Image: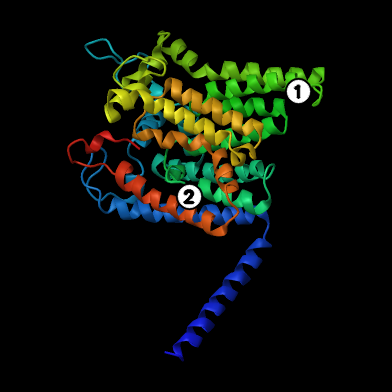
Amino acid sequence: MQDRLPRTRVLREAVDAELYFWRRRIAGWPWWIQVTLLYALSRVYSLVVFLAVARQQGPNPWTEAHPDHLSFIGIWDSAWYHQVYSEGYPADIPRGLDGRAVENQWAFYALFPGMVRGLAAATGLGWQLLAPLVATIAGFAAVLVIFKLFRRYAPHGTALWAVAFVAVFPVSPILQVPYAESLNLALLAAALLLLVQRKYLLAIPIVVLMCLSRPVGVPFAALAGLHLLWRIKQRRTDPLDTPEFLRAAALALVSCAAAVAWPVLAWSITGEPTAYTDTETAWRGEDLVLFRPWFDMGVHLFGPVGGMMAPLLLVAAAAWFLCSPPARSIGAELRLWCVCYLGYLLAFLHPQTSTFRLMLPLFPLALAAAFVSRSRAYRFCLAVMFLAGQIVWVAWLWSWSQLPGGGDYPP
């Protein structure tokens, strides 16, 4: 026993020395190599999770039992994007016997499938290979831009941990499947970075593309408008000359126009002013009523009293965290973006299991999470919890179950 203790201590010290050596060596690498390594490792982990769950997948509406990896990640909304890629959009909104719109391609924005279609024409490759490749590369671009954005508010180590939280977040496997989330995340991060840098004119084309990738234009337009009002209010301490005012105003106006570009495009092609909103509400089976779905879901889960209080408690919790010292450390613009996006979700979203995926644009909160504590143990444990959450998300939501009600939980 006495001989074993020194040998154990020597082994532990050797392992600690080796880890210290590699930490020092990696710390000397350029930032983009560190981010690349982090992103690559996180995507390999998600790939392993997908492969493991695919082996357990039974027959489903899209594939046979035990599908291969590319087929497995091509289910759910990936199939809708594939339909846009191969067929385009209907000239008329399909409707049921009751006159209500049924699910169709107009709910899925054109930029991602359009990019894949262009690459397919140039390379001769097909959707099944190109779509996840484009999504994964877009996710890589996103984490690079996010790191540059976070470095404006945090030292290198903290910014890198925050990027790690984004890369291993429970819904982060979505960054490598044929969804538009990764492309939208890259464009959103770039738009926020340019806004923070006050490069308003450069942000305009990014915002237009962002508004053609996913429906985040309304909250970004709100952010751009509030940012302009804040600059006007602070002009005595933060000078705002006429040319810069015009550039900021141009970004705000273009953001407002871009926010409604997709619904207007759907209207112009189908001839129906409510083509887009009718399509979006087809999934919820009821008309759009602002804020009401949160209270309906609360009543469904917690009863009449608790259900009416639940959304208010969620708002209070979000307000408390956004006013906390860690959140204040991420800067006014990023906090304001989180407020605008949360307000947008509260007004328009029908809460369900896909709500977890829709939290991804709140990625600035990853930096706030890193600011909660500088403890390496805290940050490591949080990352491990997120990695475990990926297993839960893929096995529970991405995998389609034949059990009663199992297919009703979309990722």
The amino acid on which the numbered mark 1 sits, given as a three-letter code, is: Gln
Residue 119, visible in the rendered structure = no
Q: Which mark is residue 88?
A: none
| Image: 309 above or below 272 | below
Whether residue 306 is situated above or below residue 69 in the rendered picture: above
Residue at the location (37% across, 25% down)?
A: 309
User: Residue 112: x, y in percent?
Assistant: 48, 33
Question: Is 238 or 139 nearer to us in this picture?
Answer: 238
Which amino acid type is marked by label 2?
Val
Q: Where the C terminus falls, by quadrant?
A: top left
For disc 1, the marked residue is 234
Q: Residue at x 41, y 16 (%)?
A: 290
Residue 230 found in image quarter: top right
Which residue occupies the extreme front position in the image? 305
- Name the side, left or right, on which 379 lies relative to 401: right
392 and 9: which is toward the camera: 9
Q: How far from the left and from the top, in percent, is residue 364?
A: 57, 38
Q: Label 2 neighbourhood size at 10 Å, few (<14), some (14-19), many (20+)?
A: many
Mark 1 → mark 2, Cα distance in angstroms: 38 Å
Quarter in which the N terminus is drawn:
bottom left
* Residue 44 falls left or right of residue 391: right
Q: Is tag 1's residue or tag 2's residue first in the polypeptide sequence?
A: 2
Q: Residue at x 33, y 42 (%)?
A: 398
Which SS class for mark 1? loop
| Circles 1 and 2: CB atoms closer than 8 Å | no
Which color scheme is applied? rainbow
Q: Is residue 149 above or below residue 284?
A: below
Q: Position of residue 209 (x, y in %)?
A: 57, 27
Name the residue beneath numbered marker 2.
168
**Outermost residue, left direction?**
404
**Eye-nearest disc, 1 or 2:** 1
